[in-house]
Amino acid sequence: MKRRVVVTGLGCVSPLGNTVEETWQGIKDGRSGIDKITLFDTSDFAVKIAGEVKNLDVSQWIDKKEARKMARFCQFAAVASSQALQDAGLTKESLDSKRTSIVIGCGIGGFEITEASMKKYFEAGPSRIPPLSIPMLIGNEGAGNVSMLFGIKGPAWTLQTACASSTDALGLALDQIRSGRVDMCLAGGAEGSITGFAIGSFSVLKTLASSYNDNPTAASRPFDKNREGFVMGEGSTMLILEEYEHAKKRGAKIYCEFAGYGGTSDAYHITSPDPSGEGGALAVELALEDAGIKAEELQYYNAHGTSTSINDSSETAMLKKSLGDHAYKIKVSSTKSMTGHCLGAAGALEALICIKAMQDNIYPPTINLENPDLEHGCDLDYVPNKAQKAEGSINCVASGSLGFGGHNGVVIFKKI
């Protein structure tokens, strides 16, 4: 018998808002969080838009002095973690520090620190590199800072599987709790990579939408015939995952059960997913098997849905391959149409959206879906443009993430 794992706390900082409720309200309203970039001067850039976190007062959640020692992604992780712990009714003092772990997915890390430090290096030489450059920029410092802030002494791990990072982090946390190594895990993802180097690099890779600088909210359009690339996002989402009996014993509020996870690799291409969807389909099948449910029980799937031609068509093929005819009966949507693509933090954000969808019995929309790309097989029910109230109860949901390098991760949640 597997130990059951439940979700007891949620925290979120996203382009749609600086709390879970602000973010979820933006999703329900079909509002885009994409706008002109303010974090750096875009005068010389082909792409001038992104999904930035806006007006975040970090000092509401963590000490200003501590925050100054953190890269942007670490600040996001600290804020979302603080929110999740508060939501779960936990404090630094009430946590069983040795029986609690941390797993954070992060695709890139502190790019803004890298840029600033390299500038100092090239302009003034090695002696002028800021002393905290390395401790601030490396990807594991999100988990390290959260560990120190809240006194968590179990494993504090960072998982890096590109855009699948935080989905895989949730899967790893699930296994940690099931194994009995810990009773609780603070798991999710964080990313803060809206910098000149990142935007420039993805631009020359021809993966970003570049024709919507004057109409930012229309730029991310998954499954639409006129899509041309993804839009960069940022933020952090953290979940408190807890062994079921442990949660019941302390009288915790339980959102849902974290029922299953599946992870695979395409072994196909360094940036492109396998067009057949074979690897992703296997991840769905493994997640269903792990959750002990049939494909027909799945009601909603939050797609990776990046708004790139190859991703959207291959992911649709993946669902048809794994779910058969049922792929046409479930609701599928890409909330990246509103948040942009938060890279390593995307999967955890979309898992949270799945959980809120199940809680409120609302199917999130795919906005900007005006002309589905039927020519490339994008013919499922993508909940176009407006959220839909479910006719009954939404009891079983899934979220999938597909990362550069062929990483595939799928998580399944269900009502208790």
Image (cartoon, helix red, strand yellow):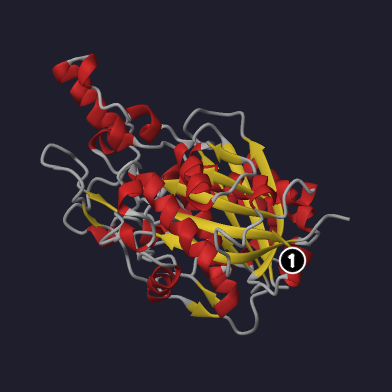
Disc 1 target residue = 296
Task: Name the residue at the right extreme.
Answer: 1
- Residue 75 vs 298, above or below: the answer is above
Task: Name the residue at the bottom extreme.
Answer: 391
Residue 126, image x, y percentages: 24, 15
Q: Residue at x 30, y 60 (%)?
A: 56
- Residue 66 vs 184, above or below: the answer is above
Q: Residue at x 74, y 71 (%)?
A: 248
Side of 267 where 260 appears, left or right: right
* Category of crowding for the residue at label 1, using alpha-carbon neighbours closer than 10 angstroms: few (below 14), some (14–19), many (at least 20): some
- The amino acid type of the residue labelled 1 equals Glu
Q: Quadrant of the N terminus?
A: bottom right
180 or 196, nearer to the observer = 180
Q: Is residue 195 visible?
A: yes
Residue 193, image x, y percentages: 34, 42
Side of 396 where 14 appears, left or right: left
Q: Residue at x 47, y 51 (%)?
A: 346
77 or 50, nearer to the observer = 77
